[in-house]
Amino acid sequence: MDQMDQKVFDLSDIRVLDFTWAWAGPYGTMLLAFMGAEVLKVESMARLDHSRVRSLIAGPTYGGVNQTGPFNELNLCKKSITVKLSDPRGIEVIKRLVKISDLVTNNFRPGVMEKLGLGYEELRKIKPDIILVSSSTCGSTGPEKDYSGYAPSFSSISGLAHLMGFSDGPPTLVGGRVDTSVGTTMALASLAALIHKKRTGKGQYVDISSREAMSCLIGDALVAYTLNRDVYRREGNRDEIFVPHNAYRCQGYDNWISIAVGTEEEWQYFCRALGHPEWIRDERFLSRESRKKNEDELDRLIAGWTSGRTDYEAMEILQKAGVPATPMLDNEHLSEDPHVQARQMFLKISHPELKERIALAPPWKTDSPGDAQIKRHAPLLGEHNDYVYGKLLGMSREEIEKLTREQVFY
Amino acid sequence: MKGLFAKSVANGKVVVNMDSPLSGVPVLEFGPGFSGAYCAKLLSDFGAEVIKIESPEGDPARGRGPFAGNKPHPEKSGLFVYLNTNKYGVTLDCKKSEGKKIFKNLVQKAYILVETFPPSELSALGLSHNVLREINPRLIMVSITPFGQTGPYRDYRARALNICQASGESSLMQTGTLEREPIKDARLADDFDCGQTAAVAALGVLLSREKTGGGAHLDISMQEVLMSLGRVDILRYANEQGLMRRDLRGVVVGGLMECSDGYINLVAIQENQWSGLLKLMDNPEWGRDEICQDEMSRAWNADEINEKVQAWMIKHKKEEVYHRGQALDVPITPVYDPEDVVNSRQTAARDFLVEVRHPEIGKVKMPQPSYRFSETPWRFARPAPRLGEHNQFIYRERLGLSREEIDGLKERKVI
């Protein structure tokens, strides 16, 4: 078989009953959908995913529940069913779906699934090897389990925000990128649980704490405290080992080049590339330690060089010399970068209401070109009711119409 | 190992007992940087048998703190312990032909190889995917590099700072001004996040094995991982020309606010969150103003409202505001520093910190993974390896070399 045709990911025999909403959970289940898993997103007009209504930032208003940016970005390749969870008939249908699913995911507050009659113990009675993955701000145990938050909240309570920003400035909260990181954690845990089930026939309950997920990304800072009672601080772009290590202004409007020198070798390449080989023997910069000590001065000297060049010019000179350097690319210029273009990260996909949307390819490439493609737009609300209720559950046309009329499939 | 998904069945009942999802799955970790180490750490935390291959000079992470007793020492790095607890450690010089041979023998027995070499360097070593897949067609090779295996920047050098800046992330980091430089994510967070996405891809291929036959070269570009994580903002520009920038904060009610002893983050957009906030502030007069009456008008007047809320916040302590606010259903969270996180009662209640042993450091507490598995909890398998600690064990047990052969390799500086 031709190597190019061979699929690398094929999770088409995995069905996910997906109760996640907002940003974090959906990004995670979208990664599974990218790999071919059948992700059934459980929705309802009675309680819309807020990403179908707005982004949390007071931003643009959209033309309808199928047209919002965030929803379309975070739910590609999934299927959508509408069902009212507050109606016992809706829960009955859900339970029938559990029976034919491998994985149930949610990012509700702890206790919500139990209240719906869909806690792990209940699910196990329906399907003994079911996997339930739950993600919440603080996890489902502990004195703060009922506390709620959003991405900036996870970044603040995890210790991440404290470690970001200028040393003479306030902490820096982070939004979306925290959600998607937590979503990635959810996907990772789900895959591990699925592998375990495939090997042993056993399902399990996986409980994820979003704040812990972010704390793991600064695990070294936590160890600095447990080991030495050291409390790390934010230092802008600086690093305790690498020097020079910063972003420097270039020619042009808001153009910057980032430079990260990590070895003695790179330092020598760097000095020569800037036309300052004498820095190699300069007392101020002789060793890594002395460079750290004189870092302010060094940064000023470097800025003197970068200010005479554009960001791309500087990158070319430095990369040719073997020095890690990249421009600051903002969202406007990202799609214009020659490397980003060559890697075809920006894809056009068709959308029934929006004609065409630009989407971002999955965060991996393989030898199979299909893996870098997006196969389908995010689902319209309830788009797959007929398929899921009719084909998968074998409900009759009349039954589906009745439950739709009575706003159970709503 | 008999077939990853081969189940032992007796009397129609499954009898395989796996302590962990990846028990017995052999993984190799090879190459510089932190993202490969973190990816392999995630796999070892799931019980995989991870062999970390270091050059005879050792992983540069050994030179990065925090150090026990604050004294730099290659066997006393807390970062190294965090990244490499539960792994085996060997040394190997793959520039030497004997080293290449040993590497290939290790690859033959591995399910997953995590590597972080610049593509041209790996080719020059004669260990590219084309070569390795001849040896082991079912190998899942996970290559994590700054810009991927193809494209004009494929051989460009970059560290986390550079990737963060080149992925759009730094342009969004809210510093409130264009006057100063764009800043990076916290410490090694971006390296770790790239390792996490790489682990997702690796497990996806592993799970697909029965259908696809296994075998893959996963091309993980760190720039693309961070772009994917930042996709909503990136696509907001691409689709709607909505520009987000480090000095353009979307103004909403709430955000970062100062307390008497630190900072909190407040979210108070929805009706119930807003009324909870008013209760927290003991229902101030101004809460009845017209601009406060509905979500829309609050959004329009957010600056003014935030000023008033901030004036209240500064008089209160962050823990008090946190707990009282949450009790009133307001999503308020304090900005914790690492000390706060370690000392948090929630951290204690969930045993987030686990104590691991290390022969040189003694005992140290570090985070366990953020996911708690009911059937297969995280386990401590072995301390982070000292340099070359498992040379004898791995090369003898896995490759069948004799003690004398291994000693010879050491003499010739192959290991």
Image (cartoon, rainbow, N blue to C red):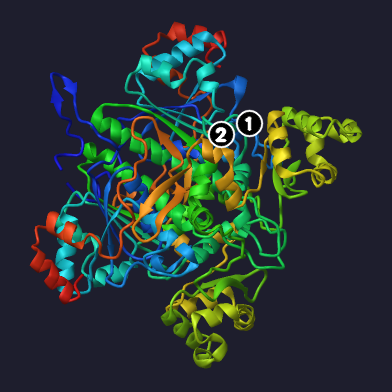
Q: Residues within 10 Å of mark 2 (few under 14, many from 20)?
A: few
Q: Are marks 2 and 1 in contact (CB under 8 Å)?
A: yes
**Which residue position holds label 1?**
A64
- Mark 1 belongs to chain: A
- Mark 2 belongs to chain: A
Q: Is residue A377 above or below residue B386?
A: above
Disc 2 residue type (three-letter): Glu
Q: Earlier in the sequence, mark 2 or mark 1?
A: 1
Q: Position of residue A353 (x, y in %)?
A: 56, 34
Q: Quadrant of residue B209?
A: top left
| Residue at the spot 57% in from the left edge and 31% down from the top edge | A145
Judged left or right of residue A336, residue A161 is right
Describe the element under mark 2 as helix, strand or loop. Answer: loop
Q: Is residue A199 visible?
A: yes
Which quarter of the image is occupied by the N terminus of chain B? top left
Q: Position of residue A283 (x, y in %)?
A: 55, 91
Which-is-in-front pick, marks 2 and 1? 1
Describe the element under mark 1 as helix, strand or loop. Answer: loop
Disc 1 residue type (three-letter): Gly
Q: Is residue B189 above or below residue A15?
A: below
Q: Quadrant of residue A388?
A: top left
Judged left or right of residue B289, residue A305 is left
Q: Residues within 10 Å of mark 1 (few under 14, many from 20)?
A: few
| Residue at the spot 59% in from the left edge and 51% down from the top edge | B339
Q: Position of residue B126 (x, y in %)?
A: 21, 69
**Which residue position holds label 2?**
A353
Which quarter of the image is occupied by the C terminus of chain B? bottom left
